[in-house]
Image (spheres, grey):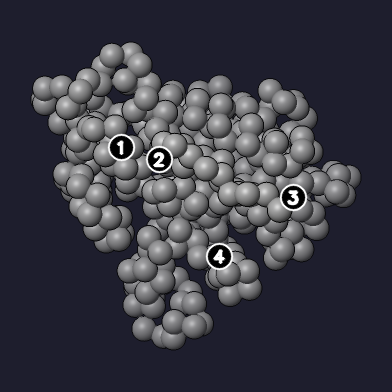
């Protein structure tokens, strides 16, 4: 029996998350589908990794000094990760979020001691977009840095140096495909680059929600979205610095309904309480697995990211009235609105 890991630094708790075989998705795909349990990070999401690399990179370059402040624009999870990392290293945090994100994320940020600024959701071209607002706040405050998760490539280095080697090692170097959705692009690009360095034949797939523009970009060369999604933290309309050069081999577009079907099944049958981004990732992994099997790789193995905990969405995904208001199917155990 292996003893649990022992750490002398709380920040060492970030990363080295478990990998679990997902039975239902594996059966649906006809091959093994593995989920990287990023909800096991201290901040309960994959974004802890980017937060740690970004803050340590700013410290190493001398930009973030004692008593300084980290400012970031985020859908929530990166802000939570930054707040925890900043607390552990003695820094302050200012987080800017769109005001349509889950109440649980906002409450968590306040509980962690971050200063929370909310702004109306708007297009990236609008100067009042949460990303641009966070940049201005950083520029206007002394001894403050802007984390800039979308275009700061310390983000994807977290996955090149951390997540990808972990997956490779956990699967003993036998992996045929990897997929996830894109928010900043750091996870997909970083894991893709890291895995391709181990085996160029590993198929890397984008899993895009409706409303995002990347599916069409990789399929047809044009940044053009179609439809909409309620998923938080994923869906991108531009090629970020983190996404530049990402080794994307194929792409899938997944609806919220399909993603929610997997959220429901994984909770009901496998005891995993996840957010919608994880459900969309799992749907993409099943699609990739089926593609690999159709190409003759009957014993294929596909990995994806289980991004965060469903406990972060109790007022949305797990609320019958909210689901009904969005014209989404209500989980049967919640009853009708």
Whether label 2 touches label 1, CB < 8 Å? yes
Q: In the visual, does 321 lie left or right of 3? A: left
Quarter of the image that includes the C terminus: bottom left
Q: Residues within 10 Å of mark 3 (few under 14, many from 20)?
A: many
Circles 3, 1 touching at the beta carbon (< 8 Å): no
Q: Residue 23: x percent and y percent?
A: 72, 63
Which residue is nearer to you in this view: 120 or 7? Answer: 7
**Image spot of residue 200 (x, y percent):** 74, 26
Question: Residue 215 shows which numbered tag?
Answer: none
Q: Which circle marks residue 272 in the picture?
A: 4
Q: In the image, residue 89 lies at what x, y percent?
A: 29, 32
In the rendered image, which residue does mark 2 sit on? 10
Up/down of 283 relative to 206, above or below: below
Q: Which residue is mark 1?
A: 88
Looking at the image, residue 180 lies above or below residue 201: below
The quarter holding residue 240 reads: top left
Q: Which mark is residue 289?
A: 3
Q: Tell me the distance, in whole angstroms, between the alpha carbons under discs 2 and 1.
A: 8 Å
Distance CA(mark 4)–CA(mark 2): 25 Å
| C-alpha separation, residue under disc 3 versus residue under disc 2 | 36 Å
């Amino acid at each position: 029996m292996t003893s649990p890991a022992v750490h002398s630094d709380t920040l060492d708790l970030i990363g080295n998350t478990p990998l679990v075989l997902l039975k239902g998705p594996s059966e649906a795909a006809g091959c093994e589908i593995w989920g990287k349990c990023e909800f096991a990070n201290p901040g309960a999401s994959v974004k802890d990794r980017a937060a740690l690399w970004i803050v340590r990179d700013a410290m190493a370059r001398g930009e973030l000094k004692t008593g300084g402040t980290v400012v970031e624009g985020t859908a929530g999870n990166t802000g939570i990760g930054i707040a925890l990392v900043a607390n552990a290293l003695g820094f302050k945090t200012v987080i800017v979020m769109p005001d349509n994100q889950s109440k649980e994320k906002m409450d968590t940020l306040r509980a962690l001691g971050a200063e929370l600024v909310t702004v109306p959701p708007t297009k990236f071209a609008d100067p009042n977009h949460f990303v641009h607002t966070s940049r201005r706040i950083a520029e206007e405050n002394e001894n403050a840095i802007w984390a800039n998760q979308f275009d700061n490539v310390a983000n994807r280095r977290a996955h090149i140096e951390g997540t990808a080697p972990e997956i490779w090692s956990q699967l003993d170097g036998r992996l045929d495909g990897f997929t996830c959705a894109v928010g900043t692009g750091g996870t997909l690009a970083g894991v893709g680059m890291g895995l391709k360095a181990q085996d160029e034949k590993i198929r890397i797939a984008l899993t895009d929600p409706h409303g995002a523009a990347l599916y069409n970009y990789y399929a047809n060369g044009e940044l053009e979205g179609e439809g909409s999604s309620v998923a938080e933290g994923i869906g991108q309309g531009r090629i970020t610095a983190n996404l530049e050069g990402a080794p994307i081999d194929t792409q899938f577009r997944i609806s919220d309904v399909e993603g929610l079907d997997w959220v429901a099944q994984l909770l009901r049958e496998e005891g995993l309480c996840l957010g919608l981004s994880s459900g969309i990732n799992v749907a993409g992994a099943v699609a990739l697995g089926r593609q690999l099997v159709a190409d003759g790789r009957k014993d294929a193995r596909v990995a994806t990211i289980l991004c965060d905990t469903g406990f972060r969405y109790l007022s949305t995904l797990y609320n019958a009235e909210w689901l009904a208001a969005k014209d989404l199917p209500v989980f049967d155990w919640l009853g009708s609105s």
